[in-house]
Image: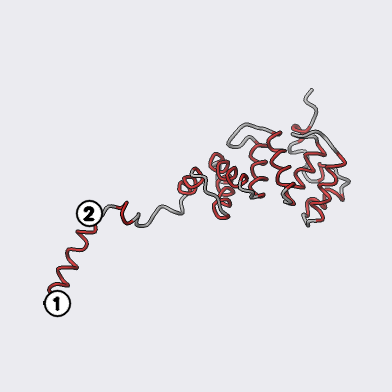
Amino acid sequence: MYRLALAITLLVTPALAEDEDPATFGTTNPDEMTWMRFRERAEGGETGMVLCSMGYMMTKSGDHDTARLLFENCAKDGYTGAMTWMSQLDNNGLGGDYDPDAAAEWDRKAAAAGDPVGKFNHGLNLLRGHGIARDEAEGRRMVDEAARDGLPVARALAEADYDPDAVTPDADAWRYGPLF
């Protein structure tokens, strides 16, 4: 009798399971590691170390809109690496308009939060007067702080007497010249 009951139970269970409401028991094999799922989580305002790091993959793959969404949320939550990536997106018009003022502000925020890359970028912006008023003394100070923090490119810039061409040779020179 026990074996008959067990056999009937095993035969009926799959049929009953198909009628279950997914809302009651959740989703089997949720879509948790796809790009769309990371975007959905970002649209919901979620942040976290793994989610924030996905912005890098998104921008490198060309999905700048999703990268911007991820990085902006993460930057607002204090992730300084996301702040420097927001600067990069704004400074290159990726997923939004070219906006050197916004880029410089993201770098300033990252620097103020103690991020060495933010300090370096903010210092470089100050040296050039790009997106922010030119202030060579403050620019040098910021680069020096980044160098003390161990950032090799900051040391290289300081050793080159703060000549921006030493770290960014003419690739973007058109951006930093006079507008008239």
Tell me residue 42's x, y (percent).
51, 45
Q: Residue at x 21, y 63 (%)?
A: 13
Q: Quadrant of the C terminus?
A: top right
Please give the residue where the numbered disc 1 appears in the rendered image.
2
Asked whether 61 or 141 is in front, the reply is 141
Direction from residue 66 to residue 149 in the image, left or right = right
Q: Residue at x 78, y 56 (%)?
A: 149
Q: Residue at x 30, y 53 (%)?
A: 22
The image's colour scheme reads secondary structure
Tell me residue 33's x, y (percent).
46, 54
Asked whether 11 or 75 is in front, the reply is 75
Disc 2 packing (10 Å; few <14; some 14–19; many ≥20): few
| Outermost residue to the top | 180
- The type of residue carrying mark 1 is Tyr
Tell me residue 84's x, y (percent).
68, 45
Q: Alpha carbon of mark 1 to alpha carbon of mark 2: how far?
A: 26 Å
Residue 36 numbered mark, or none: none
Asked whether 23 or 124 is in front, the reply is 23
Figure label count:
2
SS of the residue under disc 2:
loop
Q: On screen, 102 above or below 53?
A: above
Direction from residue 37 to residue 103 in the image, left or right = right
Please give the residue where the numbered disc 2 appears in the rendered image.
19
SS of the residue under disc 1:
helix
Residue 85: name its quadrant.
top right
Q: Are marks 1 and 2 in contact (CB under 8 Å)?
A: no
Q: Earlier in the sequence, mark 1 or mark 2?
A: 1
- The type of residue carrying mark 2 is Asp
Tell me residue 80's x, y (percent).
67, 49
Residue 139: name its quadrant.
top right
Disc 1 packing (10 Å; few <14; some 14–19; many ≥20): few
